[in-house]
Image (spheres, grey):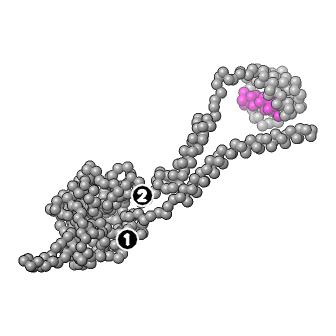
Amino acid sequence: MNSRIVLEGASLRTSRLANWRAYLTPLAIVALFSVMLLAALIASPPPTPIRYDLDANHESGLLGLRLWLEELGYDVRRTGGLRFDLPADADLIFVYPNQLTYTTEEAAYLRHWVEAGGTLALIGPANEDTALIDAFGVRLNADLRPERQQTQMQPLLPEGRLTYLREWFSSSMTLDLTDAPRAVPVLALTATASDESLGEIVETRTVAAVQSVGAGVVWHFVPGVDFTNLNLRSFDQGELLPALLRTVPEGGVVVFDAYHLFGLSRVGDQIVTLQDWLYRTPTGWATLFALAASAIFLLLNGRRLGPPLVTVQQTRGREAAEYVRAMANLHRRARTHTELAQHHARRLKVGLARRRGVRTDLPDAQFLEALAYTSPPLSDAQIAAVRATLAGLAGNPGEQQLVSLAASVDQLLQTIR
C-alpha cells in the first residue's frame, strides 16, 4: 500500500513537471516580447514637433485653425490612404509645402476640381513641386529686404488693415505671378526708393494673391502666411480667413491634404486603426517583430500545421478482442461493476420504452407493470425474462454474470418489437 502511494506521488510530480515545461515556450515568447517592447520605448527619441500637424498645439501646428473652422460649423477632414483623392462633397482644400511632390496627374486632377467650383488655399508651393507650378502658374521668389511693409493691394479684405508690419510673417519668399495673368495681388510687400530722373518709386512684391480658375478660386500664399498657431495668435493672420471663406458655403467640407504633406510615412496623421498603430509606433514595430520571431520559432519546431501526423506505415492495427480485453481490465481495476450494471439496466429500459411507449423513470416494478399493459401484449415468457434481467442487474452481479446479463439485454431488445 505504501509503495503504491509513493508511486502515485512520483507520477503526480512528474506530470506537474511536464505541465510546467509545456508553458515554457509561451512564457519565453512573452518575456521576449516584453524585453523588445521595453527596449523600443527606451530607444525611441522624444517626439519632435511636426510642422502643419492638424492635432498639434505647438507654434507650427494647425490645431488652432482646425478648431476655429470646426467652431464656425465647417466639416474638417484630411486626405489619406494609398493615393491622393478628394471627397466628392469637398468645398475648400488646404495644400501646404509637401514631403511628396504632386505628380502631373494629381496636379491636373486638383486643377479640374477647382475649375468645377472648388476653393483652393495653396501655401507655396515649393520650387521643386513643378507639377503644381505648371498647373496654376505661380512660383516663389526670394526676398531678403527686411525694411518692407505689407500693404493691402485690393479691397478684398474689408475686415483687415490697410498695412501690416513686415514681422506679420516670417517668410523671406514672395510670389511670382508672371505666368498667372489672372492672379490678382491681395497683399504685397512695398518699399519706397528714390531716383534722380524718375523721382520716388514704390516697389511691390506679392505675398498673397487670388486667382480665378474656371468656376473656382485659388488663394496663393507664401509659406509665412500659413495660419499656424503662432501666426494666428501673434500676428492676426485670421483676418484673411473671412475673405478665404466667402466662396465656401456655411457648414461646408474643408479638407487638408495630409497625403502629400506627410509623405509615405504619414507621420502626423491620426492613428485610427490597428494597422496605423502597428506601422507607425515603436510598440507596434516591437509587436510585429515579436510575432515574426514567434513564427520562426514555431516553424523551426515543426508546428507549422500542428503536431506531425503518423503515417499509415507507422501504425499497427489493433484487434477488436485486444480492445475488449483492455477495456475489461480497466473496468476491473476501477471496480465499476455497479455502474456497468446500472448502464445495462438503463439501456434495457430505454430500448423497451421506445418500442412500447412507457416511461423510463419508473421503478422496476412499476415499469414491468406498465410494460405488461402495452399493445400488442408481451408474452409471459418475455415479461419474465425482462423481470429476471432487471433483477439480476440490480443485484450487484459478478463479472461473468454481468456478461450474461448484457447478452440477455441484447437478445431482449432484438426480440421485443
Q: Earlier in the sequence, mark 2 or mark 1?
A: 1
How many C-alpha atoms fall within 10 Å of the one at disc 2: few (<14), some, or many (≥20)? Answer: some
Q: Residue furthest right?
A: 1
**Disc on res. 244:** none
Residue 214 x/y as whole percent: 18, 58
Residue pictured at 69% horizontal, 23% vertical: 315
Q: Position of residue 157 (x, y in %)?
A: 23, 74
Query: Is residue 355 magenta-colored?
Result: yes
Disc 1 crowd rating (10 Å Cα; few below 14, some 14-19, many 20+) is: many
Q: Quadrant of the N terminus?
A: top right
138 over 202 or under it: above or below = above
Residue 164 is one of the magenta-drawn residues: no
Magenta stretch prevailing secondary structure: helix
Q: Residue at x 88, y 41 (%)?
A: 6
Q: Is residue 153 left or right of residue 368?
A: left
- The stretch in magenta equals 339-357
Q: Answer whether residue 70 is visible to the viewer in this image.
A: no
Residue 106 locus on image (x, y percent): 28, 51
How many callouts does the rendering have?
2
Q: Nearer the viewer, residue 215 or 343?
A: 215
Question: Measuring 41% from the left and 63% from the top, which residue is drawn there?
Answer: 50
Gap in angstroms between the C-alphas marked 2 and 1: 19 Å
Label 2 is placed on what type of residue? Val
Q: Looking at the picture, which amino acid does disc 1 mark? A: Asn
Q: Which residue is found at the position 37% from the left and 49% from the top?
A: 82
Q: Secondary structure at mark 2?
A: loop
View extreme (front): residue: 196
Q: Which residue is mark 2?
A: 267
- Find residue 229 and name its label: 1
